[in-house]
């Protein structure tokens, strides 16, 4: 019995994966709940989302809450849900993605100009980005050398190796 508790406790301490975090917030109702918690955290608001407002059954509601808890995005303290530190990072990242989506056509235009004018000086691309893009966070991402971003991504994402079968 001790071994069962020990292994269960060790299992509970495994860190969430990128796919588990993205999988949980890919559900629109879970994302709505997650964002409402984030907004209420930022406003020190104790607003509770009713099941009726979310158009969910009790089971559906608790499945989504459970998923957010397991992914490490929210915690429950004294009967109130709030974001974990990981949840805050994910929420801020989601806000950056939302901002990028709102500037989608500007990003496409910059990309098109870069592609069609490969001999365009870097200074002119920088100037174009500064004129078209409002968000400093997105500008920083666009100004970062591409090879640095790729190296960081490669080191963070673990791609499962294919198993070879012996015949």
Image: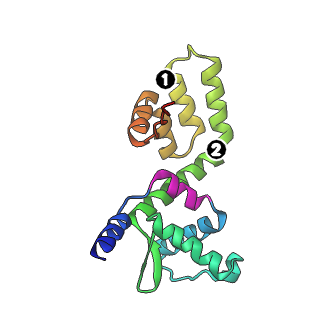
Q: Which residue is identified by label 2?
A: 103
23 inside magenta stretch? yes
Q: Residue furthest bottom?
A: 78
Q: Residue 148 location in percent, x, y?
A: 40, 31
Q: Quadrant of residue 14?
A: bottom left
**What secondary structure do most residues of the magenta stretch adopt?**
helix
Q: Which residue is identified by label 1?
A: 123
Q: Secondary structure at mark 2?
A: loop
Instruction: Out of 167 and 49, give the one closest to the viewer.
Output: 167
Q: Residue 125 location in percent, x, y?
A: 54, 26
Q: Residue at x 45, y 74 (%)?
A: 82
96 inside magenta stretch? no
Find the magenta span and give its range: 17-26
How far, Cα to Cα, is label 1 from label 2? 21 Å
10 Å crowding of disc 1: few (<14), some (14-19), many (20+): few
Instruction: Out of 55 and 143, give the one closest to the viewer.
Output: 55
Q: Quadrant of residue 4?
A: bottom left
Q: Residue 159 location in percent, x, y?
A: 46, 39
Q: Residue at x 66, y 26 (%)?
A: 112
């Amino acid at each position: 019995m001790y071994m069962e508790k020990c292994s269960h406790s060790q299992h509970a301490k495994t860190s969430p994966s990128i796919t588990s975090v993205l999988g949980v917030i890919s559900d629109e109702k879970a994302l709505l709940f997650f964002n409402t918690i984030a907004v209420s955290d930022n406003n020190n608001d104790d607003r509770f989302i009713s099941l009726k407002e979310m158009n969910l059954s009790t089971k559906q509601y608790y499945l989504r809450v459970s998923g957010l808890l397991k992914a490490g995005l929210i915690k429950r303290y004294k009967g109130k849900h709030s974001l974990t530190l990981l949840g805050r990072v994910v929420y801020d990242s989601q806000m950056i993605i939302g901002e990028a989506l709102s500037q989608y056509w500007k990003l496409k235009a910059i990309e098109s100009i870069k592609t069609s004018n490969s001999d365009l000086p870097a200074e002119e691309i920088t100037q174009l980005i500064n004129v078209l893009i409002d968000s400093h966070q997105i500008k920083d991402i666009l100004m970062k050398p591409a090879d640095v971003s790729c190296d960081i991504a490669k080191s963070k994402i673990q791609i499962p190796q294919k198993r070879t079968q012996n015949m």
